[in-house]
Amino acid sequence: MSLVELIAEADELGLTVSGLACLDRCVSLLGGDDEILRPLWTSLADGSDAEEWASRLEQARVKLGPADAADAADEGETVLLARRMLAAAPGTRSAADVREWADDCSVAALRIHELLDASAGGPSSVDAHREGRTEGISPLVAAELRRQITVLELLAANGSGGLRQALAVSTEGRRVLRAVVSRRARGRA
């Protein structure tokens, strides 16, 4: 099943976790550490109400947000895409809101990986990859696509019982992306 189909069939929890996992894998681009989004994961695991989710989301935004508009203007496309994921996260977890957010996060995370993949041979179609057409997909984008599919499959098969595994998939992806960013920074120095 393609990523687009999995998102279309996912329930509210699966969509919320999908969006959060994409953001979590890219959080290092915003200067966040491995624990900064943990309160959001915890609120999903313990079944916290919508008010608690909104409060924890706002705390993450404050910790990760740019100091002012001038700071944001100086950032590269990858950071701007990650900031948009965070800014667009819905304070309420209605199915419609989180479906749009999960879809947008999926596209943004794949685009970030595409921009950072040194082996990418040129522009590709993130949309085509999400629909299952993977010809010419670069290794970093292919790995991110697999992670997104895995997270949605885990939640579809296990419900909230799949949260721990989804977090593990996200943690692994965050480490990979952090290593790629570090390698690129060393290459420019």
Image (cartoon, rainbow, N blue to C red):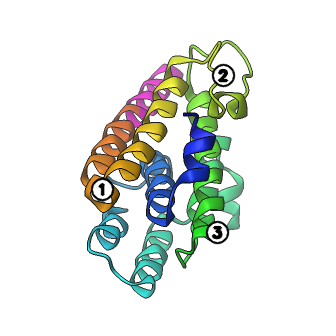
Overall secondary structure of the magenta section: helix
Q: Is residue 154 visible?
A: yes
Q: Earlier in the sequence, mark 3 or mark 2?
A: 3
95 displayed left or right of 150: right
Among the 4 quarters of the image, the one containing residue 37: bottom left
Residue ID at (34%, 54%) = 33
Q: Quick one: SS at disc 3?
A: helix
* Residue at x 49%, y 46% (from the top left corner): 29
133 relative to 36 in the view: left or right: right
Around disc 2, counting alpha carbons within 10 Å, would you say few (fewer than 14), some (14 to 19), or many (20 or more)?
Answer: few
Horizontal side of 144 relative to 4 (left or right) equals: left
Where residue 139 sits in the image (x, y, percent)? 50, 18
Whether pointer 1 and pointer 3 mark residues with C-beta atoms closer than 8 Å, the reply is no
Residue 133 is labelled as 2
Residue sitting farthest toward the bottom: 51
Report x, y in % for residue 28.
43, 47
Rendered position, 165 above or below 117: below
Q: Is residue 97 magenta?
A: no
- Could you tell which of marks 1 and 2 lies nearer the N-terminus? 2
Left or right for 36, reference 83? left
Is residue 189 visible to us here?
Answer: no
- In space, the residues marked 3 and 2 are separated at their CA atoms by 26 Å
